[in-house]
Image (cartoon, rainbow, N blue to C red):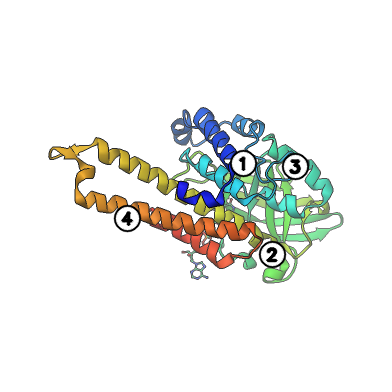
Amino acid sequence: MSAFQEYFDESHQLVRDSVRRFVEREILPHINDWEEAEEFPRELYLKAGAAGILSIGYPEVFGGSHEGDVFAKVVASEELMRSGSGSLDIGLPPVVKWAKPELRERIVPQVLAGEKIMALAVTEPSGGSDVANLKTRAVRDGDFYRVSGSKTFITSGVRADYYTVAVRTGGDGFGGVSLLLVEKGTPGFTVGRKLKKMGWWASDTAELFFDDCMVPVGNLIGAENMGFACIMANFQSERLSLATMANMTAQLALEEALKWAKEREAFGKPIGKFRVLKHRLAEMATQLEVSRDFTYRQAAKMAAGKSVIKEISMAKNFAPEFIE
Ligand SMILES: Cc1cc2nc3c(=O)[nH]c(=O)nc-3n(C[C@H](O)[C@H](O)[C@H](O)COP(=O)(O)OP(=O)(O)OC[C@H]3O[C@@H](n4cnc5c(N)ncnc54)[C@H](O)[C@@H]3O)c2cc1C
């Protein structure tokens, strides 16, 4: 990791050390059991909240630390990924950035403390990539929006308390999309089945249904019909997290492969001594270095306030591809 020190300072090292200790103490001893059980204890959120991990990158006024520090979030994401299972922080940022003060002040501290859990609900059964054509409707009815429709593939959707939901408040296309905060327990809102996945079993993925669900207008996040821009802005940091997590997954695979190449003997010597494996390991290390460098460069541009929509999307596409 030393080749990348230009991107990190001492405070990032402190974050890295503290998140790594947390993962070693609270997650690694249990992660295999939790993956098999397809569940992890809710208490882990409280522990992560108390350790200050959930609040990294958020404003101090809500109990956060390292406000807006892109590399503090990168470091936290890398170290959490050492657990081998994924974690995403995508539901809360729109609330912090664009919700009305009353809503923000009520919701954000609870989530950063790990008392409440948030999810982001954009994807629908009819499609995820084409956000501008989402179909879940929210029609104004007095002081409420009447919401009808459904969502799928929602991370933490089973256990969440609050949902940042993309809905159609206006006409067709991206100009008719808004974000609403929906609370679990709101009449007309139900959580469907927990979906099966190929990996990250401990992280639940759900379907959501809205049937004339009445959501107060005060729960609108950002301006009405301006949700598409908020969603796209949120995708930038999500893409950075996903690229970072994929790079760390590759690093873990490389570390395991190097260990095995030294341990395992065949034909009288460790298999790592065979030229064909040396080439393979060198190729893995090279691809990881290239992917990580490209990802960090985009993170640095994001930290400098530049728009890197194309490049961070490339990083998010490249990183999971090369570890396959
Ligand atoms: C583990 C997991 C967790 C997730 N968590 C969440 C979450 O928390 N919240 C949430 O809202 N969503 C979540 N998603 C959904 C995810 O965002 C969508 O799966 C994604 O947006 C793709 O949508 P889709 O699956 O409907 O595929 P579609 O958009 O229907 O795409 C189908 C196929 O068409 C291709 N395609 C799409 N657009 C184009 C194009 N313009 N040109 C050429 N080909 C195209 C795609 O590459 C794909 O092969 C999650 C998904 C997974 C797998």
Q: Residue at x 41, y 48 (%)?
A: 250
The CA distance from mark 1 to mark 4 is: 32 Å
Label 1 sits on residue:
11
Q: Tag 4: Cα neighbours inside 10 Å, few (<14), some, or many (≥20)?
A: few
Q: Earlier in the sequence, mark 3 or mark 2?
A: 3
Q: Nearer the viewer, mark 1 or mark 4?
A: 1
The CA distance from mark 3 to mark 2 is: 25 Å
Q: Nearer the viewer, residue 147 or 112?
A: 112
> Residue 171: which disc?
none
Label 3 sits on residue:
60
Q: Nearer the viewer, mark 3 or mark 2?
A: 3
Whether label 2 lies within 8 Å of ligand 1 gets the answer: no
Q: Nearer the viewer, residue 121 or 59?
A: 59
Q: Tag 1: Cα neighbours inside 10 Å, few (<14), some, or many (≥20)?
A: few
Element type at marker 3? helix
Q: Quadrant of the C terminus?
A: bottom left
Q: Residue at x 47, y 45 (%)?
A: 196
Q: Amino acid under label 3? A: Glu
Q: Residues at badges 2 and 4 in contact (C-beta under 8 Å)? A: no
Q: Amino acid under label 1? A: Ser
Q: Earlier in the sequence, mark 1 or mark 4?
A: 1
Label 2 sits on residue:
229
Q: Position of residue 54 (x, y in %)?
A: 64, 39
Q: Position of residue 261 (x, y in %)?
A: 26, 41
Q: Earlier in the sequence, mark 1 or mark 3?
A: 1
The CA distance from mark 1 to mark 2 is: 32 Å
Residue 229 falls in image quadrant: bottom right
Element type at marker 1? helix
Element type at marker 4? helix
Evaluate whether residue 39 shows in this view. Answer: yes
